[in-house]
Structures are given as C-alpha cells and as structure tokens.
C-alpha cells in the first residue's frame, strides 16, 4: 500500500535523544514516491539514527514519521512488509551460502512459493552472483556482498528501500554498478532513501537532505543546494605561492572565504566583479596568476559552505 | 505465527550449527565426557574405611571384636599398633580415618557385666565419611554387644535369650545401594543443562554481536517466530543427547532401566524446553556471547550440579538454601529420571514434577519473548 498523497516518507519534528545526547534534532521533510532521496552529512550527524527510526528499529523520542502510509510508532510491523533495509554494517550470514541467504530472506519476507525461484534467480542475476550460489557469503569480495545484501533486501519488491551507506568500503567499479542498480529500481517506481558521505554519489540523487549535528540544515536538488549554498559567487584561482596568495586574498574587501581545493584556491566573493582587483593585488605582490574565473560550486563546496555556516551559527547561539 | 518463516529460521539455524565445529563438538562430546567423568568420578559409596586399632588387652575377646571390623565391607583393618602415640600419628597422616582403642580390662569388665568403653577416634576433616564411619562402627559394636549380652544371659540361666527387636533391612529400587545407580541417571540432567543453555545462550547474542540481528528485525518476522524457530533445532540436538546419555547409562554403566521410554521422553522433552528457554532468555537479555556463556554456566551448570539433588540430597541442605532449589529445573527432572530408571514409575505418578517443569518451561519462553524487542535500543 502506498500513501495516496504522493509521499513515501513524511517526517515531522522528529527528535531522538540518547540520554543527554540529541542525535536527531527536530527534523522535518518528505520523500516523494519514486525518487532517490539522499541523506548527506558527516559521521555522527544523525543519518543512520533517522533511517533506523524510519525502519521501525528505533523509537523516536518525539515527533512523527509516516512510512508507506503507516506511523512508525503505531504500526512498525506494517512498515516492515513495505520496506527493504540494508544496514551500514554488512549483516547477512557469513556462514550461509549465497543461495541460503537469499532463500532465508525470501522466507522472512514471505515471498510466495510460486515466485520464490524467479525472485532468487532475479537477485542472483542482478548481483552478478550466478555460478556462486553455493559459495559461503563470508568468502565474497566487498562489492558482491553489497549487491547480495541489496538483492536480499528487495526480494519482496518493496515500494521503499532504505540504504544506509551502502557503498562504504566498496571499490569504485562496484560502486558505479551499484548505483546503476539503484537508478534502475528508481525508474521502476521504487522510492530509494540512501545515506552517503560520497559527494559523487550525492550527485545521483534527485533530492538531498544535508544533516549536521542532528539538524537538517539544507534540503533540495543537488543544483539547488550548490547555487543556494553560496551567497555571492565562487571564483577559481590558479597561481603559484598558494600560501601567500591565501593571506593576500583574504585581506581584500568583498572576499568572504578562501579555501584550498587541490592545487587551486576557491574564493567566495560577494560580487564576481572584484575579480580584477584580486588579480591586481596578487600581481602587485609578484604572484603569477595562471587562471582566475567564475565557476559553478561543486556539491563539496556547498557541503563545506553549509556546514561551516551552520557550525558558526551554532557557536554564535551558544556564546550569546 | 507463520509456519514458513518458522521453518526458514530453523533451517538456517541447522546450517549454522552444522558448519560450527565448536557447537558440534559440544553436542557430540559432552554426553560422553560428563558421563565418564561423573559416572566414574563421583563415588559417594563409603566402603573400605581404613582402621587402625590399639588393642591394650590382646585377649581372645578383643581379637574377636577386631575381626568383626575386618570382616565388614565398610572397614579395612589396616594395622594394629602398640601405643597410643602411633594411633594419633596415623590419624594425623591420614593413614587411617578411624582408630579403635580396646582397653586393658576389656574382657574382665565384660565378664563381670560391667559397662565397657571402646574409644573410637575419627578423622572429621571429611565430615561425610566421619559420620558414616561412626555409624558403621556403632553398628559393629552394637551387634557384638548383643552377642555378648546373649551369652551372659544364657550363662546366668535367664529364661529368655531372644532379642526383643530385630531389624531386617531391605533396600528397594537400588538394592545394592550403589551410588552409581543414583548418580548416572542424573547425569543426563547436567548434560542437557550444559548443552542446552550453552548453545542457545550463544545463538541470539551472536546475531547481535555480528550485526545480523539488525537485518533480521527489519523484516516482518515476529519475536516468537525467532524464538521458536531457533529452539527447534536445539531441541532435536538436546533429545539426541538425552538418548545418548540414557544409552550409555543402561548399556555401559548397567544402570537398571525399569520405567517406560515414553515417560523418559515426555519428561526429557519438557525439561529441555525449560532449559533452552532459560538459555534463550539469557541470550536475549545479555546480547553478548561472552556474558551469555558466563551467566549460562553460573545459572545452569552449577545449580544443576549442586542444588538439584544430583550430588547432595535436598532435604539435607541447610534450610536457608532449600527454597532456592525450587528455581532449578534440574531438581524436578532428576526426580523424574531417578523414578523412571530405578523405580519404574509411570507418567501418572510423576504429575508433580512434570507440572512444575511445564510451568517452568512456559515461564522461560514467556520471559524470553518479553525481553526480546524487535528494536535496537
């Protein structure tokens, strides 16, 4: 059963405290049916706690969460029939074979006997594990384990899929394969709720929620976040003597922030029109400028800008 | 309760046990090990108590008395010494547990019909043996005294020489009073307590430790399905061990088996559920394998061994300890085992301990279910 209002997940003022520690601090958002919804944030920002509440594995301290039309507190068992979940840590049985794990989870999710063979075949095909049915799961390489875990989580064709850092510790090729599978399922109408701290993966999401310190600090499409995060413009500066250049640029009026990105600098300015002033100032100090141009911020820029601004606000709040 | 999920969990559990050499070894070797250790090692029979004697008189009569000691199967007359000091040293060294002193005026006093005091010195460091030694020694002396008295009366031409009361003891159920017959059937209760609690106490804790529980509880499976699904394979293993213990008891130790196999199976089955339920409860409550196995050992093995009546009769325990024995499942099962093996009691007469075990088993499964939350916190 799907929620009729087009939302798969609705969260309102959700709070989770562990003793004195507030892991999730009054967050609210909605996930549309069929979208890939990314949860982005540093470790300990409350991503996993939120996902566990939505799967009915943790009780919220207060607030409301509706998943697939059911309240997580009132009917967690109905939610469990409608979701697939992949926990952060690999959590299939290492001492069972690939086939035994699939058959076990098919049993847990009550996959009808007539469909059983087809669904297991489908999962084996998807995970690229055909021919390895009788390998012990513990002996598989990381990428295969991950795809098997995904296979186990979707045997019952759940309309909503929760993935908690599904690709951590997996090689780049396997990660790309994994995301192709995610996109494919999303195309079939499955709502995917995924946490990650890989910026490139965040780009694959339809919408992103940025978490920091238990709070939801930004929500939008990757493009919206990139554009909205920077008040002003972003300049890319390639020059020699980077250390001196940082100090020089930072002292100029109209420069908000300077950060090193690889062997270049990213400069946040109120107005791109001061670019010639920057170039002039550096050249008068004898620093050779190879390039200075306006660029579109990357998701990483947005992430850094938003979290530092949020941390600064939080500090200001504490000191006031 | 969904039968397919139940079967899926049991099947998974069977695969895991079959691939876990450590668990398999516990299941297969524990009955053999405990049966040989306890069957041969625990011997509560006090026979052949070593006796030293100091015969100050050295007469025909005193020799007669000592012969009565040496011919009893409870005593071995190890040596006759000539002075009191040697007797004391022998007790000190532990060369004997009992020392007998026959006074120099032994026959003279008997002849005159005056009371005779025989001194018996007992090594009390093992109080069980000491008490038995005193009891047996009194028995030997009393029977000798009766003979002497009869003789005395006959000589003085008394009208009647028949003793007033004569006890003719006859032991039922364990005719030879062999402690083997008393101990060996009970070993099954210990084996099942160890195997049952140890294996099940690990099964849930392991899933929490390895993180597999998080995945499992995100599915629609219910806590009762997990509990019962996991218990079924261990129930089968436990019954296998019970059968192994019974077979070893009957065919190797030659313990009589007078009851019915049905009574044995029903009693064992219910006891097993109680024990597995306890292990499961421990596992659910601790969530850690090490803690679970430690607590399992302390709550199942030791009490089953010490407080169940397996080694020490419950009515001889201090009154303060006795109430605790009601919380030990083995207490009820050992009654059933001994009755079925030695007395041949049928099911109907075992209603008391059976009902106690049913209540116990139900309480354990209920406690396990109540403490098992499908939640991470």
Image: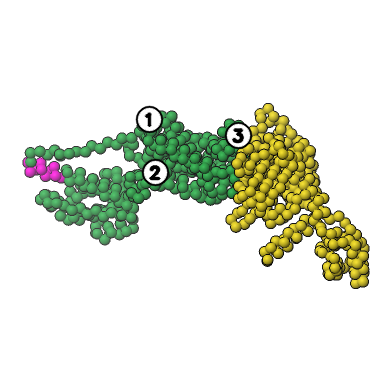
Q: Secondary structure at mark 2?
A: helix
Q: Neighbour class for label 2 at 10 Å: few (<14), some, many (≥20)? A: some
Circle 1 residues within 10 Å: few <14, some 14–19, many ≥20? few
On whether residue B152 falls in the magenta region, the answer is: yes
Q: Which chain is yellow?
A: A
Which region shows up in magenta? B148-157
Residue displayed at 66% across by 54% down: A25
Left or right: where A282 falls relative to B192 = right
Q: Comparing marks 2 and 3, which lies closer to the viewer?
A: 3
Tag 2 and tag 1 share a subunit: yes
Q: Which chain identifier belongs to the green chain?
A: B
Q: Is residue B95 visible?
A: no
As displayed, is residue A320 above or below residue A39? below
Residue A185, percent from left and from top: 76, 38
Q: Residue furthest bottom?
A: A285
The percent position of residue B172, horizontal first and vertical second, equals 31, 35
Quarter holding the C terminus of chain A is bottom right
Please name the residue that numbered disc 3 is placed on: B5
Q: Is residue A318 magenta?
A: no
Image disc number at residue B348: 1
């Amino acid at each position: 059963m799907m929620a009729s209002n087009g939302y798969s997940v609705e969260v309102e003022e959700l709070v989770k405290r562990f003793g004195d520690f507030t892991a999730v601090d009054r967050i609210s958002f909605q996930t549309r049916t069929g979208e890939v919804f990314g949860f982005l944030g540093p470790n300990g920002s409350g991503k996993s706690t939120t996902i566990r509440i939505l799967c009915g594995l943790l009780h919220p301290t207060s607030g409301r969460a509706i998943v697939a039309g059911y309240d997580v507190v009132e009917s967690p068992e109905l939610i469990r029939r409608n979701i697939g979940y992949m926990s952060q840590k690999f959590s299939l049985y290492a001492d069972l074979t690939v086939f035994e794990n699939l058959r076990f989870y098919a049993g847990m999710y009550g996959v009808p006997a007539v469909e059983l063979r087809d669904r297991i075949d489908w999962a084996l095909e998807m995970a690229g594990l055909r021919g390895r049915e009788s390998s012990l799961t513990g002996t598989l390489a990381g990428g295969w384990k991950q795809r098997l875990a995904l296979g186990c989580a979707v045997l019952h064709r759940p309309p909503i899929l929760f993935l908690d850092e599904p690709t951590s510790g997996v090689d780049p090729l396997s990660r790309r394969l994994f995301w192709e599978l995610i996109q494919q399922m999303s195309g079939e109408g499955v709502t995917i709720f995924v946490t990650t701290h890989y910026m490139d993966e965040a780009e694959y999401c339809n919408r992103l929620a940025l978490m920091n310190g238990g709070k939801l600090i930004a929500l939008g499409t990757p493009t919206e976040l990139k554009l909205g995060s920077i008040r002003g413009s972003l300049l890319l500066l390639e020059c020699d003597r980077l250390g001196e250049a940082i100090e020089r640029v930072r002292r100029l009026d109209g420069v908000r922030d300077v950060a090193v990105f690889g062997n270049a600098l990213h400069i946040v300015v109120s107005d791109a029109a001061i670019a010639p002033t920057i170039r002039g100032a550096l050249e008068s100090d004898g620093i050779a400028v190879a390039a200075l141009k306006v660029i579109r911020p990357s998701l990483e820029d947005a992430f850094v800008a938003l979290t530092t601004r949020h941390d600064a606000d939080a500090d200001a709040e504490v000191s006031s | 309760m969904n039968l397919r999920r139940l079967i899926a969990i049991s099947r998974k559990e069977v695969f895991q046990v079959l691939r876990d050499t450590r668990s398999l070894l516990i299941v297969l070797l524990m009955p053999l090990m405990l049966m040989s250790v306890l069957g041969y090692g625990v011997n509560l029979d006090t026979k052949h108590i070593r006796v030293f004697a100091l015969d100050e008189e050295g007469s025909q009569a005193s020799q007669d008395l000592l012969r009565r000691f040496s011919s009893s199967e409870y005593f071995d007359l190890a040596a006759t010494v000539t002075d009191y000091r040697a007797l004391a040293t022998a007790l000190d060294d532990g060369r004997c547990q009992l020392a007998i002193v026959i006074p120099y005026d032994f026959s003279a006093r008997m002849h005159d019909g005056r009371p005779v005091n025989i001194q018996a010195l007992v090594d009390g460091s093992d109080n069980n043996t000491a008490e038995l030694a005193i009891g047996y020694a009194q028995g030997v002396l009393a029977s000798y005294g009766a003979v002497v008295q009869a003789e005395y009366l006959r000589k003085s031409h008394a009208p009647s020489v028949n003793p007033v009361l004569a006890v003719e003891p006859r032991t039922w159920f364990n005719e030879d009073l062999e402690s083997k017959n008393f101990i060996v059937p009970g070993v099954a209760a210990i084996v099942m307590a160890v195997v049952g609690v140890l294996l099940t106490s690990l099964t849930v804790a392991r899933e929490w430790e390895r993180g597999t529980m998080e995945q499992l509880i995100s599915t629609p499976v219910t806590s009762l399905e997990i509990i019962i699904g996991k218990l079924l394979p261990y129930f089968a293993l436990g019954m296998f061990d019970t059968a192994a213990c019974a077979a070893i008891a009957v065919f190797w130790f030659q313990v009589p088996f007078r009851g019915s196999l049905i009574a044995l199976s029903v009693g064992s089955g219910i006891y097993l559920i109680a024990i597995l339920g306890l292990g499961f409860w421990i596992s659910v409550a601790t969530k850690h394998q090490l803690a679970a196995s430690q607590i399992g050992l302390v709550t199942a093995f030791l009490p089953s061994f010490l407080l169940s009546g397996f080694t020490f009769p419950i009515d001889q325990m201090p009154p303060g300890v006795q109430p605790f024995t009601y919380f030990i499942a083995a207490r009820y099962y050992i009654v059933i085992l001994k009755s079925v093996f030695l007395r041949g009691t049928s099911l109907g007469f075992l209603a008391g301990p059976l009902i106690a075990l049913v209540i116990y088993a139900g309480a354990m499964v209920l406690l396990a279910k109540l403490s098992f939350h499908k939640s991470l916190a």
